[in-house]
Amino acid sequence: MASPERFEQIALPHLDSVYRAAVAVCRRTDEAEDLTQMTFLKAFERFDMFKPETNCSAWLLQIMRNLWIDRVRHRKVAGTAVSLEQELLVTEPKVDTALWSDVGDFLENFSDEQVPGKWAL
């Protein structure tokens, strides 16, 4: 486990650049905040794997990229999220009431003009 002080010294200076990249990818600030938070959480959990002589910003952006790809894949499988406030009931389709009372009435009142398109005579 990496020390929190070392993580703060090396990784936290890149917070703004990771957030800006997350906004560019997500195009929504609330989602970008979540992605940035998850990126730094994952980076802290695996900070013992970070090599001090390498580029920390690139390492963080790679973590962010992988998290974003996982999120996109999950959305494809899970489908679109629906808020709890959104009405979920499907409205019944409108059914036109019959214009004719029986077959005789139908045949008597039916005209060729009522047939759409190429079927009209």
Image (cartoon, helix red, strand yellow):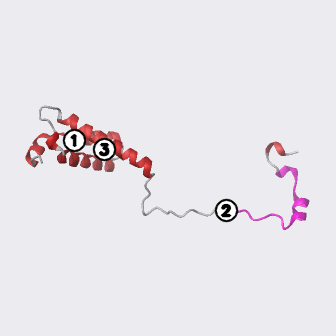
- Amino acid tagged 1: Asp
Q: Nearer the viewer, residue 90 or 96?
A: 90
Q: Which mark is residue 67?
A: 3
73 lies left or right of 60: right
44 lies left or right of 65: left
| SS label for mark 1 | helix
Q: x%, y% of residue 82? A: 44, 57
Q: Which residues are magenta?
A: 95-114
Q: Quadrant of the C terminus?
A: top right
Q: x%, y% of residue 76? A: 44, 47
Q: Residue at x 24, y 40 (%)?
A: 18
Residue located beneath label 2 in the image: 94
| SS label for mark 2 | loop
| SS label for mark 3 | helix
- The mark that comes first in sequence, 2 or 1, is 1
Question: Is 105 inside the magenta-drawn segment?
Answer: yes
Q: Which mark is residue 16?
A: 1
Q: Residue at x 12, y 44 (%)?
A: 7
